[in-house]
Image: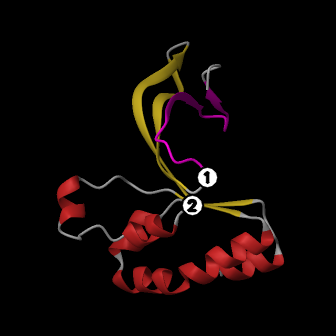
Amino acid sequence: MLGDLLQVQRPRAVVLDGLPQLVADRTALSRLNEMLGKLVQLARSTGCALVFLDDPKPPWQRWFNLDGSRTVRWRAALHIELQRERWLRRDNEMTGYHAQARLLKSRWVHALRSAEVEIVFNGTVRARETW
């Protein structure tokens, strides 16, 4: 279905917020791993960014190869880790959060970098002016 979406609709970006659930289902994970190369090629040819949201795994799961999303990360051109540091509030209402973004992998930049960002729940992502 995702392949059809990329070919027909040609979106600029697709965000998949369900990687942990796919990893939990062996059949779905196997199918994703089979199709990942084709999806990457389709995304590249249509100019679409595929964004997979994943939950971080503790190191012991990675050490014992219990981390099912490693194939997706291996194929990724960019891997960014966000660590929430504090919630943003306005008038006693939660409006977003302040986070530390750390570049773990990039095909374009070879030095690890980090930056402070604010994720605002209206869809806006703001970085510090120095970033």
Residue 31's place in the image compared with 128, above or below, is: below
Q: Is residue 79 magenta?
A: no
Q: Is label 1 in a helix, a strand or a loop? A: loop
Location of residue 43 by image quarter: bottom right
Rendered image: mark on residue 23: none
Q: As displayed, is residue 19 above or below residue 84? A: below
Task: Pinpoint residue 121: horizontal percent, then vertical percent.
Answer: 60, 34
- Compared with 112, 5 (above or below) is below
Q: Is residue 109 left or right of residue 64?
A: right
Residue 12 horizontal side relative to residue 27, left or right: right
**Rendered image coloring scheme:** secondary structure
Foreground residue, 14 or 70? 70
- Which region of the structure is painted magenta? 109-127
- Considering every residue shown, the one lying at the far front of the view is 110
In contact (CB < 8 Å): disc 1 and disc 2: yes
**Residue appearing at x 23%, y 71% in the figure:** 65
Q: Which residue is mark 2?
A: 77
Q: Quadrant of residue 128?
A: top right
Indicate which disc residue 108 carries. 1
**Where's residue 113, x and y in %?**
49, 36
Q: Residue at x 46, y 81 (%)?
A: 33
**Left or right relative to 80: residue 65:** left
**Left or right of residue 104, residue 14 in this image:** right
Identify the residue at horizontal 50%, vertical 56% (top origin): 53
Image position, residue 116 (x, y; %): 51, 27
